[in-house]
Image (spheres, rainbow, N blue to C red):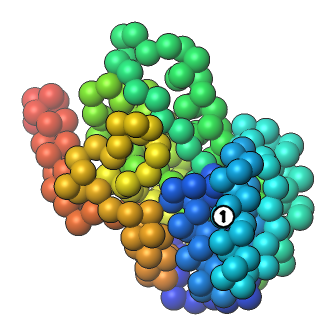
Amino acid sequence: MDVSGASLKLKGRTCVVTGAGSGIGRALALKAAAEGMKLALCDVNTLGLAETVRLAFDAGAAITWNVVDVRDAAALEAFAATANGDVALVFANAGVLRTGGVADQPGADLKLMLEINVLGAVNTIQAFLPGMRRQSAPTRIVVTGSEASFAPFPNLGGYCATKHALLALTEALSMELAAEGSSVGVSLLTPGSVDTAIFGDQGAPNPARAITPDQVAEIAFAGIAEGRGIIATHADLPDRLDARLAAVKTALGA
């Protein structure tokens, strides 16, 4: 059972965003600024992060920011200690994607995705959760997964594996926090095709389905307000899940 977002107050409180230097991370930061939140932003992309900070500052937000690699747990803990005020939202958003078949994808690519997408999310949660637990007011952790959290895609096996892992991690964390009666809620944001640079020069897959990072941010904050444990960006995700479940049942002989 998740904590309802109805009582989650945002204005004047702090929103943390990792991977804030571009794409969905930047959009989440600017949406939080528009909601009257203070910001704590980090990324390894110095120039991109500086541009997000400039845009958020122009929008009137109070900002703490630093260049942080989410693979560095100690650096994240130090960054958490500098966050502006009480933290209401933590977006564990940093992520990378490398394409390649399972049989021949370089180990370095797999290691990078596992370290940033999975361990980076865990490091972020562990850095900020202690302070969130100490608050009496509701707070929420939002981990950026993907539609790939639910189904594999050819030449994206490694990436899909990391996003599948985030589904299990967020579900387990939600159970653990509920069992202790915590006011910290957990959501998995599962974007489908989004027009960002994560695919490099290839562009977003299935451009006809692609939405903008700003649209993702709007959907994310609406899902947070509703207290959703899984926040999908595309209405056809349930149909895709039905197809995946049917394939699994067939494989089981069910």
Looking at the image, is 69 positioned above or below residue 216?
above
The x and y percentages for residue 132 are: 75, 69
Q: Which residue is mark 1?
A: 52
Closer to the camera in the image, 180 or 67: 67
Say which quadrant the C terminus sits in: top left
Classed neighbour count for the residue bearing mark 1: other residues with Cα under 10 Å, few (<14), some (14–19), many (≥20): many
Seen in the image, is 199 located left or right of residue 2? left
Q: Is residue 211 left or right of residue 240?
A: right
What residue is drawn where x is 53% and y is 67%?
Answer: 27
> Whole-percent x and y of residue 110?
52, 23
- The vertical placement of 123 against 187, above or below, is above
Judged from the image, the secondary structure of the residue bearing numbered disc 1 is: helix
Res. 87 visible in picture: no
Q: Is residue 129 above or below residue 201?
A: below
Q: What is the quadrant of residue 12 in the picture?
A: bottom right
Q: Is residue 7 visible?
A: yes
**Residue 190 locus on image (x, y percent):** 40, 56
**Left or right: 32 in relation to 231:** right
Q: Residue at x 54, y 14 (%)?
A: 107
Which residue does the image show at 86% across and 43% down from the upper left? 74
Image coords of residue 51 (percent x, y): 68, 61
Residue 10 vs residue 53, the one in the foreground: 53
Q: Residue at x 28, y 33 (%)?
A: 153
Q: Amino acid at mark 1?
A: Thr
> Is 239 left or right of 202, judged from the image as shown?
left
Instruction: Report how many numbered discs are placed on residues in the image.
Output: 1
Residue extending farthest to the top is 104
| Towards the viewer: 91 or 50 | 50
